[in-house]
Structures are given as structure tokens and as C-alpha cells.
Amino acid sequence: MNDTQTRLTQLVKQAPKEFAPQRELWDDIEKQLDKPEFQQTHANVKQMQQWKRLAIASIVLLTGLLGMNVWQQNNLPSPSDSPLLQTLAEIQMQHQLQVQLLSQQHLTDWQTTELGLPLEKGIEQLRKAAEQIYQALQQTPNDKELWQLWLWTQQREIELLQQGQSLPVNPLPQGA
């Protein structure tokens, strides 16, 4: 092994310290640096143009189909609105029945007293508000806040009618 070690050291000492290129390389390096990153061939350019056209056509087609779909949905009555409108009408009828029952009881004579006047005005205002909200709900039955407000006005009207029944009753004079 000693012989191979000596031979290796001799070869290393005899080797040149620098290697000189056979020709000048800097000109080629400069050309490579100035070149665009992707040098496309004519076939690659054609293929890219075809893909761009296809992508644009796809986007236009997709936009057209989505637009038609939205337009058709806006023109057709929504099947989900119909049950909501039916429910709205049913609740309105039930409320009117409750109000009629409360108004037909013998305890409604409070309406003829002075104490009942502010209560009666409040009930009337609630009825007007409830009617306006009802009309708005017929236009937009999916509006949850309108539903809550409408149901609140109906409940408040019933509460005011019940409060009125606890007022002192002035029976109407008979025979006068």
C-alpha cells in the first residue's frame, strides 16, 4: 500500500494547478444569460393559442349557462314560496279567530270606559302595523325578521285584549 500511496502523491504533484478551457466559454455563457427563459418552438406557440381559445370558449359557455339558469329561476314561481304563503294565510286566519273569540266574550265592555281608550288605540295601531307587515310578507315570505315581527304584533294584540279584560267593566246603561 505504501507503493500506491507514493504513486498517488507523485501524480498529484505532477498534475497542473489549473485547467485552461480549449476555447473561450464566456461568449456562450453570455448568450445563455440573455436568452429568454422559455424559448418556445412554433408548435408550442400554436398549441398554447389553441388552449387559450378553448379556455375562453369554456368560460363564455359556462357564464352563459349560469346566466340562463339564474334567469329561469327568477321567472318561475318558487315552489318553496307557496307553502310559506299558505302558512302565512293560515296563521292570519287563526289569529283573527282568536281576536274574535276574545272580542265576543262578555268581558269586552272595558272598551266603553275611559281606561280602555289608550288600550284600544294601541290595539288599533298594532292591527295597522300587522297588516302592513303581512303585505310585506306576501312579497318576501322568506324574510325571517318580518315573520318574527309579524308574529310579535299578533301576540301583543292578544295580550292587550286580555289586559283589557282585566279592566273594570262599565255596563252600558239599559233602557236609556
Image (tube, helix red, strand yellow):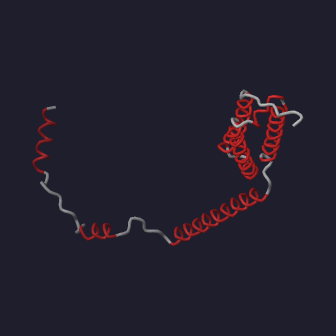
**Please, is residue 111 above or below residue 55 in the view?**
above
Dividing the picture into quarters, in which one does residue 98 lie?
top right
Residue 38 in percent (x, y) is at: 42, 65
- As drawn, the residue found furthest toward the bottom would be 42
- Is 7 or 113 nearer to us in this picture? 113
Dividing the picture into quarters, in which one does residue 172 lie?
top right
Image quarter in which the C terminus is found? top right
- As drawn, the residue found furthest toward the right would be 175
- As drawn, the residue found furthest toward the front would be 176
Image quarter in which the N terminus is found? top left
The mark total stands at 0
Residue 74 in percent (x, y) is at: 74, 58
Q: Residue at position x 89%, y 35% from top? A: 175
- Is 64 or 174 nearer to us in this picture? 174
Residue 51 in percent (x, y) is at: 58, 65
Q: Residue at position x 17%, y 58% from top? A: 19
Residue 92 in percent (x, y) is at: 80, 41
**Please, is residue 18 above or below residue 33 in the view?**
above
Left or right of residue 114: residue 9? left
- Is 67 or 53 nearer to us in this picture? 67
- Is 89 or 155 nearer to us in this picture? 155
Dividing the picture into quarters, in which one does residue 146 lie?
top right
Left or right of residue 130: residue 54? left
Q: Residue at position x 70%, y 47% from top? A: 129
**Please, is residue 74 above or below residue 108 in the view?**
below
